[in-house]
Image (spheres, rainbow, N blue to C red):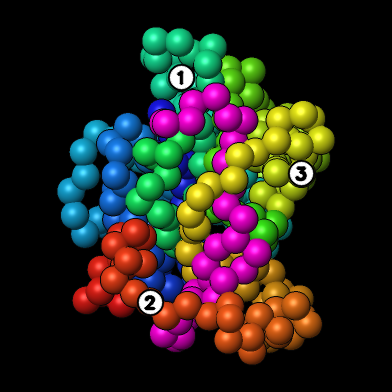
Amino acid sequence: MIVFAIPFRGKNTANDWNGCVKRLNNTLNSIFNQTDNEFKVIVACNDIPKLNKKYDERLEFIVTDIPIPKKWLEMAIDKSWKLTVIAIRIREILLEQNNPENGIYVMPVDADDLLNCNIAKYVKEHPHENGFVSKDGYVHYKGNNYLTIYKNMHTYCGSCNIIKMYLEDLPEDYPIPVELCHDIENAKILNKKYPIRFDHNIVVKKYKENGKEFSILPFRSTIYIKDTGDNISDIHNQEKGLNKNDNKLHIGVFIKKINPFTKKRFSKKIYHDFGIDYNNN
């Protein structure tokens, strides 16, 4: 069993709410394109969005009655709190399994990225791994008709790590009062305690250091959607007074952008594997 955990931003924090809803629908469509049906999707949100299709009981929404974040840091903490709320529900799901001591796979997913259709099947066939990650992945910049291949994408995309979690990794209830959910000091403590809140860029390294090395997936798991205007990283740059393109001038990023060997045109296989609606893109 794998649970896809999606924290979804509140309507009042979005630059383009309709765009956020559309991208969440794309994400859900890609997940429900799985070749194995043994999975669940849990979305924690302030506002339940309008869906463009009906889903079965594998999709759950949890509405969080928490303050609306205003700054980038509050938005990052808000995202982590929503993952914590999802973790409480995952613990309940794990306890319903025949052997809860065996743990459960959890994949945090940003509400705009796209996932490969083979994830649920592959992790089901490899139940004894500590976790999974792809050696590289795709990035799609808004407006481009191609993808860019990035190595070690888990170090900067929040939709790449598949983590085996056990009962001790999952809270039974709110670990702190809800009104303190955006408190920085409490967030720091919780970030160290619960794997679902670990910074995505350190998960693979942290588990390896603890003797729990991740297995490498034999396919690219993720298309990282960039330049939507509602990426938290974009909002961070806006607060710092940076142009949204400034972060692309890093030499490594620049080399990837001009290197033809890192480019990948959209193909029928990519449309199929990532559940992309050709007519909606």
Coordinates of residue 178 in the picture (x, y in percent): 59, 33
Given the image, on which type of amino acid does mark 3 rest? Lys
Label 2 residue SS: loop
Q: Are marks 3 and 2 in contact (CB under 8 Å)?
A: no
The answer to whether residue 22 of the structure is visible from this angle is no
Type of amino acid at the residue the image marks with label 2: Phe
Q: Which residues are magenta?
A: 124-151
Name the image quarter holding the N terminus: top left
The local crowd at label 2, few if under 14, some if 14 to 19, many if 20 or more residues have their Cα within 10 Å, is: few
* The C terminus, quarter of image: bottom left
Specify the amino acid type for callout 1: Leu
Q: What is the distance, in whole Å, between disc 3 and disc 2 at their CAs?
A: 31 Å
Q: Earlier in the sequence, mark 3 or mark 1?
A: 1
Instruction: Tell me if 206 is positioned left or right of 120 in this view.
Output: right
Q: Residue at x 43, y 73 (%)?
A: 16
Picture residue at 47% right of the left edge, 42% below the top: 5
Residue 205 marker = 3
Q: Nearer the viewer, mark 3 or mark 1?
A: 3
Q: What residue does disc 2 label?
A: 266
Q: Any magenta on residue 134?
A: yes
Mark carried by residue 94: 1
Q: Is residue 256 above or below residue 86?
A: below
